[in-house]
Amino acid sequence: MKLLHAADFHMDSPLTGLPPDKSALRRRELRDVPARLAALAREEKVDLVLLPGDLLDGDRVYPETVRSLAQALGDMAVPVFIAPGNHDWFHEKSPYAGDFWPDNVHIFTAPELQGIELPQLNCVVHGCAFTAPHREDDPLAGFTAPDDGKTHLLCLHGEVGTAGSYAPIAPGSLERSGAVYAALGHVHAAGNGRAGQTLWAYPGCPEGRGFDELGPKGAWIVYIGEPAQAAVSTPDGPAVVSVKVTSGPVSGKFVQVCRRQYRIESVEANSFSDWLPRIESPDLVRILLTGESRAAPDLDALTALAAPRFFHVELRDQTALPVDLWARADEDSLTGLFLREMRSRLETAAEGDRDKLLLAARFGLAALEGGEDIRP
């Protein structure tokens, strides 16, 4: 059996950190995620799709978003299971309560585990729903799948751990569950672990939405009873397989499906003009200017220069004052006194205050060495 595991689409996220035109384009790209996953499911010939929650960012979603999601899930033409999460929790007015979902889609609607048998696959999928924005109990507490010769799978939104506000799933509960695979949602970075004979995994989000969601994003292709293959292709070209994992009879591969990545690049400020012409990227990039610089870089001018080469770019100044300039702190002069004081403050400053103190040191030196009369 082969299955597709994806989660945390967060369709119709506001994406307020981008200019309005790019924010609108990114929302359209998020809306296109289900269609891309449907193409992957067909290409891989999966038998089953597990979607453990937060497919929608909240109740306020556009009707066309829900329609495109429903159509893509129908196009998968295999059983699809949705376990609503803390963002798209189930209630009577939820989009999940509508009657427009295709027949191949099953949506869990209760906080208690429900098992749905798929005789054609000799498989049972156990799942449940968030029915409020928070949940502090373990949805797997007291559950053990029967030893009936069937393959038991879990589809849950929650956080692996013993406590929390988002359905904490204790490792011991996973181990006692008797499931061979637990498809989890909620964590936006891909990862996996093992609890006894149960392999659990998070696919992360299929598209990053900020600089806290860096790098390739995608979904898991999971094989039960056969090894993961080396590579796949999609209508948009080869997909990137970045992680493989194996646990007993279960193996999986992580497949990149994102249109763009959020990336952070460090560039020496003095070599920025040489580095930039070599770059052309569809990604969203934060450039950290590093190295030594006596004056603060003109971030507005450098951003305008870099903007045509990226979908979105922002620059941060992380340059430091030259070492030989700090050496002047030993001088018996007003400049030396000022540098000693600034160095002392920088050594004890919180991380968030260092940039401001460094800028203050630059302004102070400019004032002192520019001959400005700073006497009261």
Image (spheres, rainbow, N blue to C red):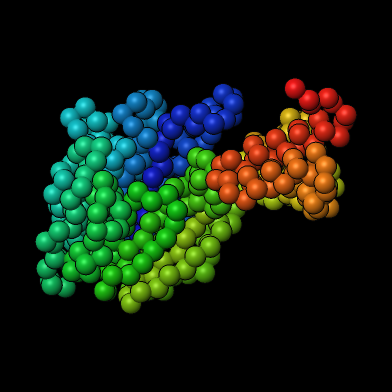
Q: Residue at x 13, y 61 (%)?
A: 143
- The quadrant in which residue 353 appears is top right
In the image, taking residue 347 as reference, residue 30 lies left or right, namely left
Q: In this view of the protein, which residue sits in the foreground, 247 or 32?
A: 247
Quarter of the image that includes the C terminus: top right
| Residue 140 coordinates in the image, percent (x, y) | 18, 58
| Residue 184 coordinates in the image, percent (x, y) | 32, 55
**Can residue 233 be seen by looking at this rendering?**
yes
Quarter of the image that includes the N terminus: bottom left
Q: Residue farthest to the bottom?
A: 248
Q: In this view of the protein, which residue sits in the foreground, 213 or 144?
A: 213
Q: Residue at x 53, y 62 (%)?
A: 241
In the image, taking residue 65 as reference, residue 172 lies left or right, namely left
> Residue 260, relative to residue 163: is it above or below?
above
In the image, taking residue 267 as reference, residue 178 lies left or right, namely left
| Residue 346 coordinates in the image, percent (x, y) | 64, 46
Total numbered badges shown on the rendered structure? 0
**Can residue 153 be seen by looking at this rendering?**
no
